[in-house]
Image (cartoon, rainbow, N blue to C red):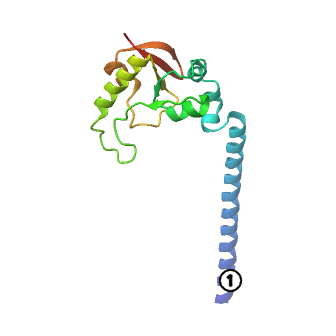
Amino acid sequence: MQAWRGLRYERHLRLALLCGCLLFLLVHLVSSGYVVWKSHQDGLGYASRKWKQSAVIEYIRSQPEDVLIYSNGADALHLLTGRCALSIPAKFSAVTLQRQDNYFQGLESMREQLSENDGLLVYLRLIDWRDYMPLEEELLERLPLESVIRVSDGSVYKIQH
């Protein structure tokens, strides 16, 4: 009799485990389906609709090929416009998070190059995950920038002469 109860208990446990696994699979199947559908609708990453409709990206495409560009999203500009861009000096190392000792020298060098070459500083607000980079407000405080365009997804600046 004892063995019979043990078998029934084991059978219920297996059934409960199977139901739990099926429920888990169903939930993930539905959520994965939504992610695939949403990705198909809007795109992912730099291929998303917000990047394709970016006014800043469109402005950069309209500029001469040889214009000097600094940006917090040099990679995005290169991927989306084919333009080479230099990265704004980082305040911290992206890997070690150590403060960059040459940060202020880098800003001054960037200012000089932008001024001498009539270059553009492009700040992409859609890139909000690079905590090691200076904020747009900090760049405005530290550099004599004048706005060329300012839209919801970013800004383009020149050095005031």
Residue at point 68%, 73% (across, down): 14
Seen from this angle, which residue lies furthest left?
A: 101
The quadrant of the rendering that contains the N terminus is: bottom right
Q: Looking at the image, how many numbered discs can be counted on the residues?
A: 1
Viewer-side residue, 27 vs 41: 41
Across and down, in percent, residue 149 comes to 51, 14
The quadrant of the rendering that contains the C terminus is: top left
Q: Viewed as shown, does residue 123 lie left or right of 41?
A: left
Q: Viewed as shown, does residue 90 lie left or right of 83?
A: left
Callout 1 crowding tier (Cα within 10 Å): few <14, some 14–19, many ≥20 = few
Residue 82 falls in image quadrant: top right
Q: Taking 19 as reference, is 98 above or below it?
A: above
Q: Amino acid at mark 1?
A: Leu
Residue 98 falls in image quadrant: top left
Viewer-side residue, 38 vs 5: 38
Residue at point 49%, 32% (across, down): 73
Across and down, in percent, residue 93 comes to 36, 42
Q: Viewed as shown, does residue 161 lie left or right of 8?
A: left
Across and down, in percent, residue 17 comes to 66, 68
Label 1: state its secondary structure: helix
Q: Taking 80 as reference, is 37 above or below it?
A: below
Q: Which residue does the numbered mark 1 point to in the structure image? A: 7
Residue at point 66%, 89% (across, down): 3
Q: Taking 145 as reference, is 131 above or below it?
A: below
Across and down, in percent, residue 160 comes to 38, 11
